Image (cartoon, coloured by chain):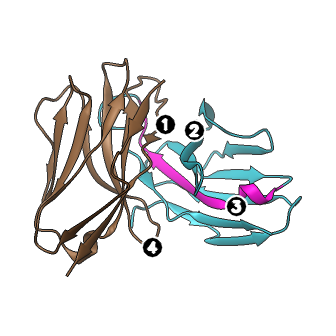
Chain colours: A cyan, B brown
């Protein structure tokens, strides 16, 4: 158990719908990262938050957005869902801070999203 | 841009034997980290081992060790005394060091390792 929690574990929805994925980082971690794992694209970085602020952005679609709340949990919002959005979505967390040894990322169990 | 290449899509090894998984990367950065993550059938991503580029000594974690060749940009994972529980997809990942805590992982496509009894 990494200490990172994600809910829900599974989500089945229809095209055009909107869903919210939730992540709670390990105790003491300030950085939260979101990754998407699909068969054709592999593991891709979406977005990072550090202590409530967006810190880095990857291949995140405009239909997707995220935020990190004052209690450091994060939510990833996916809207206007398409069949191709079906994937495993991981959240990871790290201490952050920029000093050596603080950026090792620990992953949650993932949320499997199926868009029908 | 950084890239990570794992040239072995699938490998197999007999239980108790040793196996080495290959990884090469491309970067112009000097300060970075390299990781191996394991993804068993449960789909959980589990950190196996971590290497800091400024350290010449190869990292070791129990039965797992790496051969880090900075000049060659090579980072292989050796698993000794393979166990059935080592059956998983193994991902090599790169992350550049950032004092601003901007640190996303760049993953290779993975190597599927099967340990046979």
Q: Quarter of the image holding residue B71?
A: top left
Q: Quarter of the image holding residue B38?
A: bottom left
- For the residue labelled by badge 3, is the local secondary structure a helix, a strand or a loop? loop
Judge if badges 1 and 2 mark residues of a common chain.
no
Judge if badges 1 and 3 mark residues of a common chain.
no
Judge if badges 4 and 1 mark residues of a common chain.
yes
Local crowd at mark 1 within 10 Å, few (<14), some, or many (≥20)? many
A53, A109: nearer the viewer: A109
Residue A33 is situated, as x and y percent measured from the top left of the image, at: 54, 44
Q: Which mark is residue A86?
A: 3
Residue A77 is situated, as x and y percent measured from the top left of the image, at: 75, 51
Asked if marks 1 and 2 touch (Cβ < 8 Å), the reply is: yes
- For the residue labelled by badge 2, is the local secondary structure a helix, a strand or a loop? strand
Q: Which residue appears at 74% of the width and 40% of the height?
A: A61
Q: How many angstroms separate mark 3 from mark 4 (CA)? A: 18 Å
Asked if marks 3 and 4 touch (Cβ < 8 Å), the reply is: no
Residue at mark 4? B42
Residue at mark 1? B104
Q: How many angstroms separate mark 4 from mark 1 (CA)? A: 23 Å
Q: Quadrant of the C terminus of chain A?
A: bottom right
Q: Determine whether, in the image, residue B62 is placed left or right of residue B28.
A: left
Host chain of mark 4: B
Q: Determine whether, in the image, residue B106 is placed left or right of residue A13.
A: left
* Magenta residues (range): A81-97
Is residue A87 part of the magenta span, yes or no? yes
Q: How many angstroms separate mark 3 from mark 2 (CA)? A: 21 Å
- For the residue labelled by badge 4, is the local secondary structure a helix, a strand or a loop? loop
Q: Which residue appears at 19% of the width and 73% of the height?
A: B83
Q: Which-is-in-front pick, marks 4 and 1?
A: 4
Q: Quadrant of the N terminus of chain A?
A: bottom left
């Amino acid at each position: 158990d990494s200490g990172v929690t994600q809910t829900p574990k599974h989500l089945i929805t229809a095209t055009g719908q909107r869903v919210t994925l939730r992540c709670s980082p390990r105790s003491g971690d300030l950085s939260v990262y979101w990754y998407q794992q699909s068969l054709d694209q592999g593991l891709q970085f979406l977005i990072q938050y550090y202590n409530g602020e967006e810190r880095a952005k990857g291949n995140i679609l405009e239909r997707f957005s995220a935020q990190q709340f004052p209690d450091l949990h994060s939510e990833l919002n996916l809207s206007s869902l398409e069949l191709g959005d079906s994937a495993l979505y991981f959240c990871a967390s790290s201490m952050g801070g920029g000093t050596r040894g603080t950026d090792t990322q620990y992953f949650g169990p993932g949320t499997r999203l199926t868009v029908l | 841009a950084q890239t990570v290449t794992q040239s072995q899509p699938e490998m197999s090894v007999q239980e108790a034997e040793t196996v080495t998984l290959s990884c090469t990367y491309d970067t112009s950065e000097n300060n970075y980290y390299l990781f191996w993550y394991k993804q068993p059938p449960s789909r959980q991503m589990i950190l196996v081992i971590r290497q800091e580029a400024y350290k010449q000594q190869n990292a070791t974690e129990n039965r797992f060790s790496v051969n880090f060749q900075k000049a060659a940009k090579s980072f292989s994972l050796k698993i000794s005394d393979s166990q059935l529980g080592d059956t998983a997809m193994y991902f090599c990942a790169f992350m550049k060091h950032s004092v601003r805590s901007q640190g996303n992982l760049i993953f290779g496509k993975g190597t599927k390792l099967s340990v046979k009894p």
